[in-house]
Image (tube, helix red, strand yellow):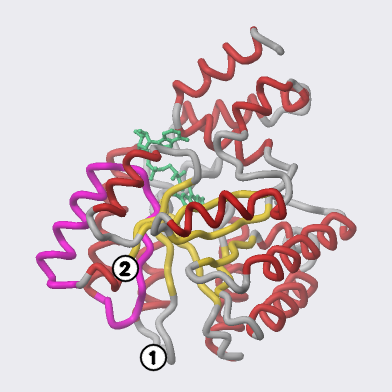
């Protein structure tokens, strides 16, 4: 994460700045990236997206809860989403562990994940752990290992972030050196959080290089992993496609993932070329922190945001 991204995140997450979330034009801008406030309202659009050949992962918005009532609300919403989408093909549900209590108590979070996995496994729907700030990484990996390796919940998947120096070792230790009953889907993203600078690669070029190296490692270990390349970076996508072709890996053995509302034309092209593409769709009313990360990723969004603030309607 560059300095400019960190600064944008710090400024917009300031309690005073958060007040802009009540301005209708800002909310309208945010809903370019958010499916709907309620899953029920999104079902027709979801069917349209699925019918066009995309896969979907639905994520209920919420994170960093320190209040158990909030965690319970998030938990009920995840269960509701599973109930509403379980009879569709090609859908998974993404979860955030800090919304399930990881910032309150590790065991409490584990209990909540356990209930979600129990419920989801009756329907055969996949549950995907999003990755958050690196202070939660060890606990997140422990939770993944416990449910995936010890309890054999084969519907549980995980995310890794290419901006962290440690990710290659984590992937080697946790993913490539394990004899899986059924391969996990591993999402590789660049990483979206404000981090300490000694933990992450210093600039975009180095992060991109590490992303590609990790992607190559995943494709080299295709018997151990189903890679999900979560990026909008056209150069990286082309390099990954070329390497997969060079290795003779069929398009069915991996997927690309992109965020709802980001570069829809590029998403369509990837589908037309016969690759799998999964769209990450956030649902819910707590969209502000998610939106701030999207603004930080694309500085031109900051100008659109300022323009929205000037036209407060
Ligand atoms: C499916 C999915 C799941 C993710 N899950 C996680 C997660 O669990 N944990 C985590 O830390 N991060 C997650 N991320 C976010 C990720 O880490 C990056 O912050 C984000 O994807 C931007 O990086 P990029 O790979 O697209 O490359 P960048 O180099 O940031 O962008 C490449 C190009 O994509 C376009 N672009 C990127 N973002 C936007 C935008 N907001 N609006 C318009 N155009 C844009 C621009 O043209 C840009 O030049 C996820 C991303 C995706 C796609």
**Which residue is drawn at the image coordinates 56% and 38% (left, top)?**
33
Residue 160 visible? The answer is: yes
Q: Secondary structure at mark 1?
A: loop
**Which residue is drawn at the image coordinates 87% and 60% (left, top)?**
68
Q: Quadrant of ligand 1?
A: top left
Residue 182 left/right relative to 216: right
Q: Within the magenta stretch, is there residue 300?
A: no
* Residue found farthest to the right: 69
Tag shown at residue 254:
2
The part of the image, by quadrant, that contains residue 81 is bottom right
**Which residue is drawn at the image coordinates 79% and 67% (left, top)?**
105
Residue 234 screen position, x and y as percent: 26, 42
Please identify the quadrant where the N terminus is shown.
Answer: top left
Q: Is mark 2 within 8 Å of ligand 1?
A: no
Compared to residue 26, the image places residue 283 above or below, namely below
Residue 165 visible? The answer is: no
The part of the image, by quadrant, that contains residue 144 is bottom right
Residue 121 screen position, x and y as percent: 63, 83
* Residue found farthest to the left: 246
The span shown in magenta is 221-249
Q: Nearer the viewer, residue 88 or 75?
A: 88
Residue 283 left/right relative to 92: right
Q: Which residue is mark 1?
A: 179
């Amino acid at each position: 994460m560059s300095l400019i991204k960190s600064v944008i995140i710090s400024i917009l997450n300031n309690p005073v700045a958060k007040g802009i979330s009540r301005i209708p034009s800002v909310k309208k801008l945010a809903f370019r990236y958010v499916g709907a406030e309620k899953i029920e309202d999104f079902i027709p659009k979801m069917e349209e997206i699925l019918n066009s050949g995309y896969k979907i992962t639905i994520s209920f918005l919420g994170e960093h809860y320190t209040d158990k009532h909030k965690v319970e609300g998030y938990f009920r919403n995840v269960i509701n989403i599973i109930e509403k989408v379980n009879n569709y093909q090609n859908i998974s549900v993404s979860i955030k562990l800090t919304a399930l209590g990881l910032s309150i108590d590790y065991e409490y979070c584990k209990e909540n994940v356990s209930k979600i996995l129990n419920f989801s496994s009756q329907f055969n729907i996949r549950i995907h752990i999003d990755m958050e700030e690196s202070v939660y990484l060890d606990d997140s990996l422990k939770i993944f290992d416990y449910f995936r390796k010890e309890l054999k919940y084969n519907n549980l998947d995980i995310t890794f972030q290419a901006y962290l120096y440690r990710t290659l070792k984590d992937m080697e230790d946790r993913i490539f050196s394990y004899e899986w009953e059924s391969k996990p889907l591993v999402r590789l993203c660049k990483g979206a959080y404000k981090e300490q600078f000694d933990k992450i690669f210093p600039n975009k070029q180095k992060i991109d290089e590490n992303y590609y190296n990790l992607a190559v490692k995943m494709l080299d270990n295709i018997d151990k992993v189903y890679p999900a390349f979560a990026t909008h970076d056209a150069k990286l996508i082309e390099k990954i496609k070329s390497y997969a072709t060079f290795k003779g890996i069929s398009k069915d053995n991996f997927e690309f993932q992109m965020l709802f509302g980001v570069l829809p034309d590029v998403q369509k092209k990837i589908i037309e070329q016969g690759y799998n593409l999964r769209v990450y769709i956030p649902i819910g009313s707590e969209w502000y922190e998610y939106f701030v990360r999207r603004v930080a990723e694309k500085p031109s969004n900051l100008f659109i945001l300022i323009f929205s603030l000037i036209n407060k309607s």
